[in-house]
């Protein structure tokens, strides 16, 4: 169906999101009045009225007509007011024109038809993430593969391990993948802090450091100490202290869903029905049988009905959650492994309760800590900020970007993408991003992790068209959320699956690598650090085609314009008044110039390019 909107440039479509430009009060309290703003360009037509349809106690109401509060550069700004009657609220805009046409604007975009409530913008009273989170540049480290210090040579190879030499090829699949042992340790991380500092990293994320019987250590045998093979407690204390001195934060990785079957709690109860720790797991048949993560025997699942388990793990003053963020360790938060499964089994669902308990336990000790939940599926409608401040999820950034740059000439299948289409257009990439980001409140969206790849999936570079990593990395650093550099991305490493992507870092060129990527990552991190619009600014797509996308991040201080191109030389034309200051644009990356042709700006789109410009504030 053709509508008037089809004749209006996307760059001039009405816009609203949860950022401070549109919702000045970013931390509303219960019963507080909240101003909501929308921008509408004159190209749409003459506005008759603008209203907000909002939820209150499960019922929907329209506000009185919004007030016109500004009209400049072709844009009219309207403001409505709602009251935070409930901790969670949702809303969408209704725009009525004098010619009789009307539009709805929700978190997924514009429509001429009324939309389901689940797609509304979301606002709540749970914004408690630390201020440093929204500007963070995260670097993920898998300790066994990052750096091996001289201390590691003093340790005997554990009985469970298959010893490997640092430059040796990783076994990607089959028997022994979890047992191959390269011997990286925490001292090896400390030795390379200067590399991370120069790269522009502000936050280190360590995968588990507890004793275990695997190289990944997600099968912890204790949560009370750092694995001696990694240097023990002393090594972690020294790492965090040294990182803090350089201005870097450090968070750990905690499995609240399960332990290892070598864990002291599990061993105390296995085949011993009378043991106190019996209630910590889902035992049956006189404690001979038990539930485990996806049936993997080495990963028995916690039973969070146990008050004692909650005390030892979460709530107690000496709990696991609390222990590592207190002195002498002073870690800055947690990433929770398989958080989506924590407290969930059959008819039981304690997921929401547990994430809130973990956050409360952390913030009693240090309110400046961050809590991130891994969610391998669609996280938006279940991560709202009450517990996890943000999500480690692949759906709203990683998968759409992979699919846009996917290399159909690669013979191996990228199993990470799952069933369905692997190659999509720029239109579809933007749609998929918006579809999966729509359910997040803005404060959660700013703290979501945006990786190109991680220790659990193949390397982005391996399955995408040559040259795509540079462009996609630029998108990482300019989309809302925290860019995540998986150790080795900056060296252009390859990996056909999660195991192979855990290649030891080639500090001395032990493996083929591309150090030109270092220059790009340093540049992107510097741009992100120096431009606050990339920390908290709104997100508005101003041009989308199969091969090119352009978007702006805006706050009251500045505007950042980004143009990312895929596979062909395609310039983009947008109206000059779509983004104020296009003529004064300062190129920060890419080197291209914006050309002015009458009332239009021509944005360059060389194949596999990314350009970033800084513009004056629009407000």
Image: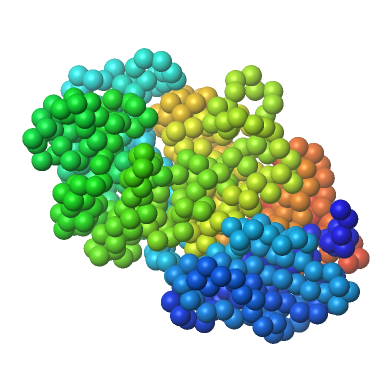
Q: Residue at x 46, y 25 (%)?
A: 500
Whether residue 229 is visible here, answered yes or no, is no
Image quarter for residue 249? Answer: bottom left
Applied colour scheme = rainbow
Q: Residue at x 59, y 64 (%)?
A: 121
Whether residue 236 is visible here, answered yes or no, is yes
The answer to whether 467 appears left or right of 387 in the picture is right
Q: Quarter of the image containing the C terminus?
A: bottom right
Q: Residue at x 47, y 81 (%)?
A: 32
How many numbered discs, if any? 0
Q: Looking at the image, which is closer to me, 233 or 292?
A: 292
Residue 399 on image: x %, y %: 59, 40
Q: Residue at x 67, y 32 (%)?
A: 421
The residue at the far top in this view is 175
Q: Looking at the image, which is closer to me, 170 or 257?
A: 257
Residue 225 on image: x %, y %: 17, 41
The answer to whether 502 appears left or right of 212 in the picture is right
């Amino acid at each position: 169906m053709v509508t008037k909107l089809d004749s209006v440039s996307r760059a001039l479509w009405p816009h609203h999101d949860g950022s401070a430009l549109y919702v000045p009060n970013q931390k509303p309290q219960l019963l507080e009045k909240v101003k909501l703003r929308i921008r509408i360009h004159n190209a749409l037509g003459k506005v008759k009225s603008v209203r907000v349809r909002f939820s209150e106690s499960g019922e929907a109401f329209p506000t009185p007509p919004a007030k016109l509060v500004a009209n400049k550069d072709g844009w009219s700004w309207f403001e409505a007011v709602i009251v935070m009657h409930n901790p969670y609220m949702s809303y969408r805009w209704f725009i009525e024109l004098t010619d009789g046409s009307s539009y709805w604007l929700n978190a997924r975009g514009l429509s001429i038809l009324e939309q389901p409530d689940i797609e509304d913008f979301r606002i709540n009273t749970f914004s408690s993430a630390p201020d440093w989170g929204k500007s963070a540049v995260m670097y993920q480290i898998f300790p066994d593969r990052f750096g091996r210090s001289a201390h590691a040579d003093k340790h005997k190879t554990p009985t469970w391990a298959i010893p490997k030499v640092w430059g040796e090829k990783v076994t990607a699949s089959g028997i022994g993948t979890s047992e191959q042992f390269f011997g990286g340790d925490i001292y090896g991380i400390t030795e390379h802090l200067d590399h991370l500092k120069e790269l522009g990293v502000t936050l280190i994320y360590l995968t588990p450091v507890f004793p275990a019987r695997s190289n990944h250590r997600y099968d912890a045998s204790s949560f009370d100490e750092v694995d001696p093979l990694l240097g023990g407690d002393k090594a972690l204390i020294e790492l965090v202290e040294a990182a803090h001195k350089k201005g870097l934060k450090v968070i750990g990785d905690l499995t609240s869903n399960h332990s290892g079957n070598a864990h002291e709690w599990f061993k105390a109860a296995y085949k011993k029905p009378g043991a106190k720790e019996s209630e910590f797991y889902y035992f049956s048949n006189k404690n001979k049988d038990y539930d485990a993560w996806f049936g993997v025997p080495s990963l028995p699942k916690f039973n969070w009905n146990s008050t004692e388990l909650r005390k030892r793990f979460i709530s107690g003053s000496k709990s696991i959650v609390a222990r590592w963020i207190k002195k002498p360790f002073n870690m800055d938060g947690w990433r929770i492994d398989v958080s989506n499964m924590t407290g969930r089994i059959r008819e039981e669902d304690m997921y929401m309760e547990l994430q809130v308990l973990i956050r409360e336990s952390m913030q009693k000790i240090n309110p400046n800590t961050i809590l991130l939940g891994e969610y391998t599926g669609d996280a938006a409608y279940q991560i709202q900020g009450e517990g996890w401040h943000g999500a480690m999820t692949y759906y709203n950034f990683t998968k759409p970007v992979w699919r846009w740059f996917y290399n159909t000439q690669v013979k191996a299948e990228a199993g990470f993408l799952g069933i369905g289409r692997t190659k999509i257009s720029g239109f579809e990439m933007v749609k998929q991003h918006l579809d999966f980001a729509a359910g997040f409140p803005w404060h959660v969206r700013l703290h979501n992790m945006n990786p190109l790849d991680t220790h659990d999936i193949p390397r982005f570079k391996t399955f995408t068209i040559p040259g795509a990593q540079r462009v996609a990395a630029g998108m990482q650093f300019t989309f809302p959320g925290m860019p995540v550099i998986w150790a080795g991305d900056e060296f252009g490493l390859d990996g056909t699956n999660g195991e192979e992507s855990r290649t030891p870092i080639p500090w001395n060129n032990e493996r083929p690598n591309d150090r030109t990527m270092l220059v790009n990552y340093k540049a992107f991190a510097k741009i992100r650090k120096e431009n606050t619009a990339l920390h908290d600014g709104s997100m508005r797509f101003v041009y989308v085609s199969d091969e090119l996308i352009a978007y702006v991040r805006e706050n009251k201080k500045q505007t950042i314009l980004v143009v990312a191109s895929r596979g062909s030389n395609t310039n983009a034309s947008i109206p000059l008044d779509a983004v104020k200051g296009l003529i004064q644009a300062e190129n920060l990356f890419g080197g291209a110039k914006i050309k002015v042709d009458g009332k239009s700006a021509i944005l360059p789109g060389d194949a596999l390019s990314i350009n970033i410009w800084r513009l004056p504030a629009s407000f």
